[in-house]
Image: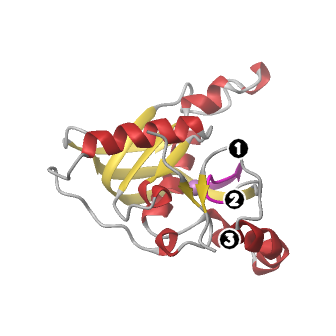
Amino acid sequence: MILPIVAYGAQILRKVAQEIPSDHPDLNTLIDDMWETMYASNGVGLAAPQINKNIRIFVMDSSQIFDGLEEDELGKYPDEPGIKKIFINAHITELNGEEWSYNEGCLSIPKIREDILRPEEVVIEYYDEAFVQHTEIFNGITARIIQHEYDHIEGKLFIDYLKPLKKKLLQRKLNDINKGKIKVDYKMVFPK
Ligand code: NI
């Protein structure tokens, strides 16, 4: 089932999400719905707070980025051809490497894209859908998306990294999103 995506301004996007037990009710349905919702809105990642659930789950699929790259951009990123993965009860334990800039967007903040600096490598502990624990290292676009989605379960948004002046310039657009004064081609719920 495709679920509506919570828009910027909603309190749930600012909460630190809670871990879930392995017997979380209807977990498989929730996971299926998250994949369906992410693909239906052409997202490369989706975190549970964005579908109004205050729990530590996110899904991501960096292969979609690589599928969309021009031929001259191939070979540029170390994580080609990308991965598709779900992260449950995740905790980032290390961020390593040089910060690099990439133009990010967010399904909860439609039609705003900004260049954001993030470290190139992430070490993350998480459980998969069978509740098997993993510790893995990711880099490239995959690490970028993981950090963005991980921020969602920590109550953070990519616009938090913008300089105050830049954020000020965006304020009117952000207010419009908050009030639902925006046209989006996927289902959203607005706080006001
Ligand atoms: Ni996002």
Q: Residue at x 78, y 76 (%)?
A: 171
Marks 3/2 in contact by CB < 8 Å: the verdict is no
Q: Which mark is residue 178?
A: 3
Judged from the image, the secondary structure of the residue bearing numbered disc 2 is strand
Q: Residue at x 55, y 72 (%)?
A: 10
Callout 2 amino acid: Ile
Check the picture and name the quadrant holding the C terminus. Answer: bottom right
Residue 153 locus on image (x, y percent):
43, 63
Q: Residue at x 19, y 43 (%)?
A: 131
Question: Which callout, 1 or 3, points at the residue further toward the start of the chain?
Answer: 3
Magenta residue span: 98-109
Give the residue at mark 2: 116
Marks 1/3 in contact by CB < 8 Å: the verdict is no
Residues 53 and 77: in front is 53
In the rendered image, the residue lying farthest to the right is 169
Give the residue at mark 1: 185
Q: Which mark is residue 106?
A: none
Q: Please tell me how many numbered marks the rendered image carries.
A: 3
Residue 128 visible: no
Tell me the quadrant of ligand 1.
Answer: bottom right
Q: Badge 1 local density, few (<14 within 10 Å), some, or many (20+)?
A: few
Callout 1 amino acid: Asp
Question: What scheme was used to colour the molecule?
Answer: secondary structure
